[in-house]
Image (cartoon, helix red, strand yellow):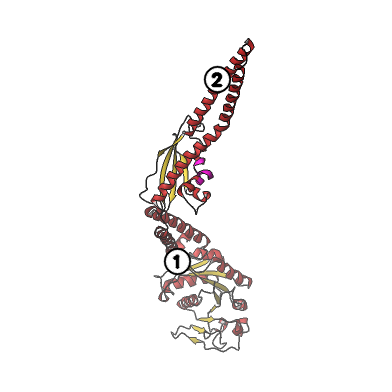
Amino acid sequence: MAGTDLLTFSSITRAIRHRLAVVVATVLLALALGGAWVLLAPPVYQAESSLYVDPGSVNGLQQSDGLLSPYYVREATSWRVMQRVIASLAMTDVTPDQLARHVNAQALRGTNVLVIDAQAPSAQQAANLANAVADAVVEQNRADAQNRQNQTRQYLEGELSRINQQLQTLQAQPADPARQIQIGLLQQQYSTTYTGLQSVMLGQSRTADSVDVLERAPLPRDPVQPRPLIDLAIALAAGLALGVLIALVAERLDDRLRRSDALGEAAGTHLLATVVRDDAGPGLAKTHEHLLARHPKARVVLVAPAGASDAAEDVARMLASAGQLAGKKVQIVHLTAPETLPAHLYGNGHGNGHGNGHGNGNGNGTAEGGNGNGTSSSQAVRLDPGRGWYDLAIVTVPAPHLDPTATRVAGSVDLAVLVGTAGRTRAKEVRKAAEALRQSGVQVEAGVLVDRAPAANRMRWKPWAAGSR
């Protein structure tokens, strides 16, 4: 039967519910954190002012693409502009670098307008900060324009003074043709220098006024942070994405058995059986038939759990009941401690243990050996089918890779059945248990995946055909 037909649906349903629970828990946690942020985060207000930059001024517009020069964008958050803002607002507990983190400047694309955004804990503080930054940029631009032209103006003014002194000296001398020529040259030089000085002064004035406040920042009405609806929507989306990611990673790393074919793959077995709660007696007989059809001469079957949390006793009773339905005399032996093994399991036919083996009281020849506390009785445990006492012995042991009991009885059993629990047993436990049995010389022939059903349903099994993987 195909592997997709071997699904243990209740186990898969539990896994799906678990993954959904992880996603829901992550989403709820994210919403809780988002709600806490909305309730506890201090409000942040943002105000916006704008500056107009003369496109004809120096550094006004870049001629290549018409975009506003980045000079003014950087200038708005520069250290010296922030110093002017701190001085104008009488701030005492903030540095220029700290203040610059609350200010942002950007050029309005395709225009010569510079937009300044400022954030503060209150609406009034945000508006004051945005307007102070705009004023500081204008003042700093004027100061820079004046500083850039001062040296040129001072030089030209000095040249004019020198030329004027020379003219006065020549004019005081007696008239002659050579003096008149020198006076004419000096007057021409004076006129040229004066024209240059006027041009510099005009350029200084134009550069100083190249930046002006276009719009002052009004008081913002609502804070930009927190934003309840947007923040909760972001928290919901983040929680959902994170929850799905966690569920996928957990599913990827989870090697617990949820399908019968997964147990078969891990143990390397051929015969598989898995629990179906609505199946009954006929299924038990089929399971027994499939098992012994491959090994008709098997008289002692070892039933071992794959892990410490798996129970082999229910499977042993299942196989015993199946043997009874087939008309066989069956004995169940529960071995829980290696030091109390009955001697006849080593093949000598007699033992010296003690116990309280007893029949099951239904007149069908089935008996259980051992008192459940780790001891067994050689008189009650008769595993010699040749004498006609029993046709089949079902022996249960602890997990083979965790307890040496299975190794001690390996020479007395014909084959082994590994028992796993759907949704609980991990594949690595099955591999370790199967390897421990094989190293002991026991052939692992069957794998039974037990669904975690209520006690009333534990004896209802659905068998699968021999050879299915």
The x, y position of residue 162, in whole percent, is 60, 24
* Magenta-drawn stretch contains 82: yes
* Magenta span main SS: helix
The x, y position of residue 334, in whole percent, is 53, 81
> Is 218 on the left or on the right of 359, as rendered?
left
Residue drawn 40% across the image and 57% down it? 38
Residue 442 figure quarter: bottom right
Question: What label sits on residue 11 in the rendered view?
Answer: 1
Asked whether 398 or 301 is in front, the reply is 398
Neighbourhood count class around disc 2 (C-alpha, 10 Å): few under 14, some 14–19, many 20 upward: some
- Spatial CA distance of label 2 from label 1 is 102 Å
**Magenta-colored span:** 75-83
Residue drawn 64% across the image and 12% down it? 178
Image: 450 above or below 390:
above
* Label 1 secondary element: helix
Residue furthest top in the image: 177
Asked whether 257 or 362 is in front, the reply is 257
The x, y position of residue 422, in whole percent, is 48, 68
Asked whether 335 or 283 is in front, the reply is 335
Question: What label sits on residue 19 in the rendered view?
Answer: none
* Amino acid at circle 1: Ser
Asked whether 309 or 109 is in front, the reply is 109
Please name which of the two marks, 2 or 1, marks the residue nearer to the observer.
2
Image: 236 above or below 404:
above
* Amino acid at circle 2: Ser
The x, y position of residue 30, in whole percent, is 43, 59
Image: 205 above or below 312:
above
Neighbourhood count class around disc 1 (C-alpha, 10 Å): few under 14, some 14–19, many 20 upward: many
Earlier residue among tags 2 and 1: 1
Visible residue check, residue 59? yes
Question: What label sits on residue 191 in the rendered view?
Answer: 2
